[in-house]
Amino acid sequence: MRQFLAVLILVALFLVLVGSRFQASDGDKLAAVSRLTARKIQAALPPDVNIAAPIEALRKGLPTHADDAVRTRLAADKRFVGVEFKVTAEGNVVTLRGVVPDARIKRLAVGVAENTVGVEKVVDELAIPAE
């Protein structure tokens, strides 16, 4: 909240200076006010460590390999409830194996894998049971 008020004060000062007869010396005053405001905002912010720690923990929890990313996306998608996929990868080439109920689910699974960040190619080894 303090940061927001400081920015509003800075904007108001700028508008007053611009709206009035702005002179060259006013630029120096505006620069001094800007520096003071920046210092106050930086002092009001928490230390970098407090901000970076949760972000770092979140980053470490994200999948880093292509097969992990595809496996996570398939498991999170409600369209694939009850379908078990075996996902392997060699580099950025992902192989999907398993039995899917129909061709639509097969297309959807391959599409999800192809549109996953870090995947260059998908090898489709999914089987559809004969009716």
Image (tube, rainbow, N blue to C red):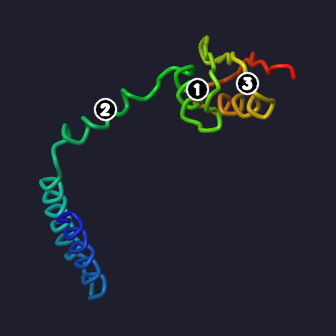
27 or 123, which lies in front?
123
Q: Where is residue 33 drawn, in percent x and y?
A: 16, 68
Q: Amino acid at mark 1?
A: Val
For residue 36, above or below residue 18: above
Q: Where is residue 127 drawn, in percent x and y?
A: 78, 18
From the image, tell me which residue sits under label 1. 70
Q: CA distance from mark 3 to mark 2?
A: 37 Å
Residue 7 located left or right of residue 58: left
Quarter of the image containing the N terminus? Answer: bottom left
28 or 129, which lies in front?
129
What residue sits 56% from the left and 32% below the top? 73
For residue 12, above or below residue 70: below
Numbered badge on residue 48: none
Q: Amino acid at mark 2?
A: Glu
Quarter-wise, where is residue 18 in the image?
bottom left
Residue 94 located left or right of residue 50: right
Q: Amino acid at mark 3?
A: Val
What residue sits 65% from the left and 18% below the top? 94
From the image, tell me which residue sits under label 3. 100
116 or 96, which lies in front?
96
What residue sits 17% from the left and 64% below the top? 37
Numbered badge on residue 56: 2
